Amino acid sequence: MTGNAVEVKQLTKSYGKVTAVNEVSFTLEPDKIYGLLGRNGAGKTTIMHMITAQLFATSGELKVFGEEPYENSRVLSQICFIKESQKYPDNYSVQDVLELSSSLFPNWDRAFANELLKDFQLPLKRKMKKLSRGMHSSVGIIVGLASRAPLTIFDEPYLGLDAVARALFYDRLIEDYSENPRTIVLSTHLIDEVSRLLEHVIVIDGGKVLINEDAEELRGTAYSVAGTATAVESFIADKKVISREPFGALLTAGVTGRLSEAERKKADALGLQIAAISLQQLIVQLTSKKTDVKGGTRS
Amino acid sequence: MTLIIDDSRPIFVQIAERIEDDIIQGRLPEESQVPSKNEFASFYQINPATAAKGVNLLVDEGILYKKRGIGMFVATGARAVLVEKRKEQFFEQYVVTMLMEAEKLGISADQLTDMIRRGDAK
């Protein structure tokens, strides 16, 4: 089982005239943590459903651990997919869910699951339908972590979880991943919270891949310039502008690219203020005002 | 050690800077062992690959070296090298910008020297 965890080529999913996923291509290398990011309706969940064989692609190629995932138990036993609103049979208790999971996932670690159960303070005997929203999400997180599946996908796993529980999740994830590396996909809106956990970022926008880049490469590749409109305009004339926010005679512009020392001095001389743009701000700017975005796809 | 990681700059650069600070301030003496990438990862809640990249940056510069099967160690002479490097940066980062701001405000060189003495007395 050498090679990539996931290979997607020209993957497309259409519903009648609506194209939810439009010729998407990317690869997920083994043992890396990926962020699959984008706005609601961008096509992220559809892509994850295809990778996990819960949805057929309209066209394109899809390989998971080198094989087609559909009705392929060898591949499917290596995937753990934790969904935003995972459903369980009504009469299942927390314990039943964990028992079932231990039989589904070959790498299941019972001791680790028990530890997590204590960390998240879950009542073992309680029925799933009697759990609060946050507890329900915690069960998903425990299953996702303790499964140690070679491909683990978390799709917005935090509904109802408070900041403390989310921090606990990140903590346990990084700890366990360090000891047991595997391919992990985090799909979330809370980009600032997870960005430093990610090794690679894929941003989906309007059914297409907008960014596919190493997370560290993205950090510090965008900055904002603020000052009088004329000064800002002259500074950004030869640059790739991703946003413009006028405020009276002032203008703040978002720019991608690294700032050279000479440019920094030029900005100083023009009386401009330069500030870094975080990954979350960058993605918000790239996926919100489409009219201002030039170029589009990066590689 | 501070826990704050700034999301607007590459994290591996910040990890390298933290290690440099620790060496300069004597918290990591020469020939002592540096925390592992996994220890950095869980301490700062960052990806272990990112932590490794920061450590490797210093290995490439000869500040750290690897003992096979044991871990990373601070090289002998690393502190002196880092102090020199930081002095260069100090000039660019603080002195040059200070002079620019002083010029903007019309502060003379004499007044500036006075201010530095006053600051030193504090």
Image: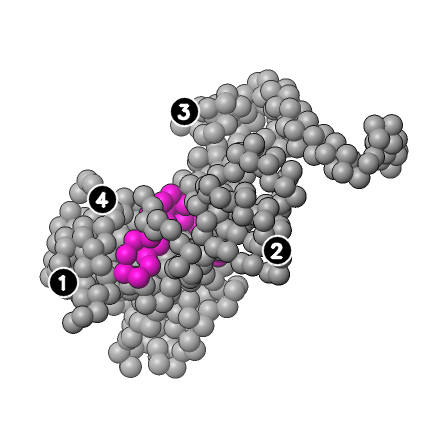
Closer to the camera, B43 or A59? A59
The residue that appears at 36% across and 67% down in the rendered structure is A40
Residue A63 placement (x, y as % from top left): 16, 51
Same-chain status of marks 2 and 4: yes
Marks 2 and 3: in contact by CB < 8 Å?
no
**Pointer 2 residue:** A250
**Residue A140 position (above or below residue B35):** below
Q: Earlier in the sequence, mark 2 or mark 4?
A: 4
Total marks drawn? 4
The residue that appears at 58% across and 49% down in the rendered structure is A230
**Pointer 4 residue:** A4
Q: Earlier in the sequence, mark 1 or mark 2?
A: 1
SS for dot 4: loop
**Pointer 3 residue:** B68
Q: Which span of residues is magenta-colored?
A: A191-216
Task: Tell me if mark 2 has few (under 14), some (14-19) or many (20+) residues whose alpha carbon lies within 10 angstroms of its own.
Answer: some
Closer to the camera, A22 or A154? A22
Q: In which quadrant of the rendered view does residue B107 lie?
A: top right
